Each structure stands twice: as structure tokens, then as C-alpha cells.
Amino acid sequence: MTLMKYIQHFTTFSFLFIYLQLSGAVEEKHCLTGEAVTLGCHVSVPQSAQLTDIEVCWQFKRRIRVHQTEGNKLFEFVAGNITKYLPGYAVDLDALLKGNASLHLANPAVADDGEFTCAILVKRVEKYVMHKVSLHVSALPSLSLTDHATVLDGEKTTVVCDITGFYPEQLEVEWLRRRGNQNVSVEADICTRSPSPNPDHTYSLRSQITIQGNRTLNHGTVYICQVKHRSLSEPQSRAVQLSVLERPQNPVTIIAPAVAACVLIVLLIAGAAWIVYRYFHTVPPSVSDICSPSVIYANTRADMKCTVRRVKPKHVDVQWYRVLPHGAGTDAPSGQAQEKEPLCTEKLTKDSQLHSENTQLLSTLSLSPKVSDDGGRYRCVVAYKGHTYIKETTLSIKTQPSFLQISSVPQVPVLGQRLLLCCRVERFYPAQVRLEWLGPGGEMLGPVVQYGPFPDYQGLHSVWSTSQLTVTAVEDGLVYRCRVYHSSFPEPGYRDLTYQVNLKGTPPTVKFVKCDPAQPQIGQECTLSLCVEDFSPDALSVSWFREGLPILTGVFTSPPSLNPSGLFTQWAFLRLTPTPQDLGAVYTCRVGHSALAEPEERSYTLANMTLE
């Protein structure tokens, strides 16, 4: 069967997305979050064409990982009707007759960063077009830095620069010092954490600089936190001015000159030795505290960094250790020098890397910690010219729940009866968790019963929470939320699960039939599959037909699975071995549900088969 005859028998867009290959390059498009953008897609349409002759489908594949299904269908126009429409994505139907099927995004978000695919079919002239647009969405970073910092002469202060709400993750932070009209880059005493994700898929990070107060050298100096990012046409910065205050006068200072004169005689005797030590002995190196991500997730790579300054890198030996529980009493206090290697430790240097530049050395330890590593102590031990310097940190491990779901009993609410809502949160760490039930207006619900948290054999935990309400006609369409608070969630520290009361049940979304393998061969077994999703209750009828005749063998379905939204998904399968007589045969899957006015059908034609 030729390709044109196949199109005549198969008018759905699954054919275009499965069998057509894009011949041209993918169009690249850039925009900022909240900045409306139009993705172009055009085809030549004859003047006599009508809307019923044109079919359009836009699909989308995200670059980021989200809990929702990837490859969402955004818009579909078939037989003169819009059969699929997601809010925020629109196609101008008046422009379709001019061949313009461009997709308008009114308020793009980070979740729209990905590849959009447009398929157009003009049935009257049997013409199709497939076009891909790669949309790169960027979110502008927001910088937060105090306007003024104060420190006593001779003491240290830390200035923190919080950078929030940016996307993508790649971002460069630089600290500058301004005296007069000149900006100089600052590299010492800086700790910049790795970016941490936010609930809206943007990122945040914190960079801080530790400044030694010296009234002569840096009083009035301006320190600048400067950021470079894809979303910025030029670097963005915030500045803070440092004030170094004199130490309060002490009465003892009045007699200090007299005491100094007496002490001077003693100092002259020991002066030679002191001068040799002070000016000719090597200045001790500066070892930074261990810098690690603000949140460390189990089974996810985390980098811990230790910076050594004022050294000759070839004379430095850096070792990393994990302090074992039974050796806690034998280790020297953190930050103090000791002559011997710490006892009761596990050496981890094989997992670390060194990078040197001039008189600075950076040691990075890469870990993929487990839940059992929570509270573990890790040490960076620096040996330099006969002296040992130790920095220590304690890990706080988190695991985000891998399963969050709301279910109801009964599945379809009944007027005048009690409705039990159950919120399940499973496989998280640590065990401390809080669940709240919120009504449509944000009010707290009661009574609430919580079961758990319960531990499992892998050290993770699960918890259930239930709430009840009486179903009235007013409840239809209202949305209730289960709010889950856990330390593994980024700001604001919680995640909402929603449940919408639906007294009629929810009709299923019936996908298109697919074949595995995509190019079946005569005599080789293949499987036709159909996905039916987002329906309630879970009772579903599925029937398969060949050329209108029912099929009873090779038919099976998966059990319905509950989605986090409280709706169900189910798969239907037909296993067969094609014969030459099956060439061009049409197989149909019929889906029935209580919320459907009539059953929906999806068809698949066995075409272009070859001998095995």
C-alpha cells in the first residue's frame, strides 16, 4: 500500500508523529518567563479549502524532569473541532485557512523549556507538514544583598549574596572590590554553594565572602556581587559598602606607653629571634571551611570543596576522610592542627580531585551518599611543611518522596454521603513530616487522621493522612488540597496535592494505537497498545476488532493505576502475528466508560509490512 493510500485510511496525527522524519533543521527560539512568544508553523492551503480539510496537532517534550507525563499534547484540531486544548497555548483558527498554525504562548514558564512539534495535514490535497521548534526559556535571577556592612577593626564579617529564581542552572558568580573608580576581582575567602532547585523548576544559590576588617585598607570599600547568566544581556550586580569601626578605647591604653617602654627592653633581648621567625618563617596557609550544597539528596552526586591558599601546591598533601562512629573519641577537634593522621577513619581521597592555580589549591570530594550516611562526619586534612590542618563538616541527607497521591472512597462522590480522602506520601527521609488538609478557600479541614510515618527496610519512611466531608451539590467542582511539609522540598518547603470533586465521574483521554515494533514484519509477532488515562471511576471496557469483527485471542489489559490527581490510567494490548492477508487490515480498539456518552474508537492499519 502506498503512503498516500495509507494517509487516506489513517487520518489521525499519530501517523505523522510516528512515521514522518523532519527533513530540515530544528528552529531555535529564545524567550524569558512571562514574555509572550509565538512558535511559527505554516503550510500552503488552497483557496477553496475549508477548516474541516485542515488538521493540526502541537506536541511538546520537556527538557526538565517533572512528575507529569512527558511529551504532552498541547493543541489538536480535527474535523473542524478543537479536540485538545491546554490553557496558555492557543492557535488562531481564523489564520488556519491562510496556512498559519502558529502556537501562541501567553505566559511561558520554565516548564515550557523544550521541543515543540507541529504537524499539519491538508486532506483535500493530501499535503502534510511537520515542523519542530526548540524553545529555550530563561528566568532572570534576582539578587539580594545588604546595602551596608559594618565590622570592628581587626575582626571578620561575612557578606551573603542570595541569587534566586534563575533558569537554566548554569550561572557564574564573581566578587569584585571597588576602591575609587577601579574594580578588582576578589578570589580569597569566597564560598559559593551549588544551585538548589525550587518548586517552580528555577534555581537558587548563595555565595558569601568573608572580609577581614582593616580601617586603613578597606574602610569605605565597596564589595560587588556580580552574576552572569543566559537570561542577562549584561552582568547583573549588587553592591555593599564596608564600614570598619575603631575599637572602643580601654582605660588600660592610657598607661600603655609606659608599659610599652618597659617591655621594649625585654623585647630587644628576644627581638632577633622574633624577627627571624616573623619575617623569614613561612606564613601559615589559609584553609577554608568545607563548602557543600545547602541540601544534599540521597543517591545524588554532591561536591564538597576545601580551598587552601598561600601555599606552593607541590608541597601540599590533601586527604579526605569519613570519621567512623567508633573513632569519634580519638579525633582531634575540628579546625586544630595535629601531628598524626586521625584514627578510626575511612580514607576517601580516591573520590577527590585537585586543582591548583598559583598559590591556591582546590580539593573537591564527590560523593553519592546514602540515607545511612546522614549525620556522617567528613574531614579535609591538609598537610603542609610538617603541619596538619583539619576542617570538618557533618552531612544532612534528604530524600524527596517518590510517591505522592490522593485517592477517594468512593471513587465517584455521591450526594449526601460521606467522602473519605486519603493522602499517601511514601519513601522519604528524614521521618519528620507534616500533612495538612486545606479546603477550597484555603481553610484548614478536620477531622484529620494520620497514620505513621512508618519506616521501611531501606531506612525511608511513609505516611498516610485522611480527611472526611459530606458531599453536597455545592461541592461539585471544588478543589481540596493535601499540603505536605518536608525538609527535602525546596522553598517554600511544601508540596500540594489536589483533588477535585466530580459527581459525574471523569471521562478518559484515549490516546492513539501504537505498534511494537513500529515496522511490523510478516510472520513476526507484534503488539498493538492503547493508553487510556485520567478517568474515574476505574471501571473501563475495552474491545478489539479486525475489520469490524471482534477479536477474542491475544487481548489483555493492565490493571488500572491511580495517578497523583486521583484519576486512573490503564493500558490495552493486542498481541498478533501478521500474515500476508493482514496487509492493509484495520484494527480498532473501542473504549467504553460511564462518563462517556458513547464509546470512543482508535484504529491502526497494518501497512508497509515486509517479509521476515
Image (tube, grey):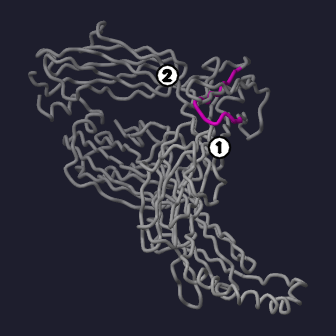
Residue 190 is a magenta residue: no
Let me know if residue 431 is in the magenta part: yes
Q: Nearer the viewer, residue 504 or 70?
A: 70
Indicate the quadrant where residue 61 lies.
top left
Instruction: Give the magenta range.
Output: 419-434
The image shows residue 71 at horizontal and vertical percentages of: 39, 40
Name the amino acid type tagged 1: Ala
- For the point 61% across and 24% down, which residue is it? 407
Q: Is residue 457 above or below residue 168?
A: above
Secondary structure found at label 1:
helix
Residue 59 vertical position relative to residue 316 in the rendered view, above or below: above
Answer with mark 2 or mark 1, whichever residue precedes in sequence.
1
Q: Which residue is mark 2?
A: 561
* Figure quadrant of the N terminus: top left
Task: State the CA–CA distance, disc 2 to disc 1.
Answer: 49 Å
Q: Between residue 192 and residue 308, name the one nearer to us.
A: 308
Q: Which residue is mark 1?
A: 328
Disc 1 packing (10 Å; few <14; some 14–19; many ≥20): some
Relative side of 152 to 543, left or right: right
What percent of the width, then of the height, locates residue 495?
Answer: 62, 41
* Quarter of the figure that contains the C terminus: top left
Residue 227 x, y percent position in the rendering: 51, 70
Label at residue 395 = none
Give the farthest residue toward the left: 611
Frontmost residue, 205 versus 526: 205
Chief SS of the magenta region: strand
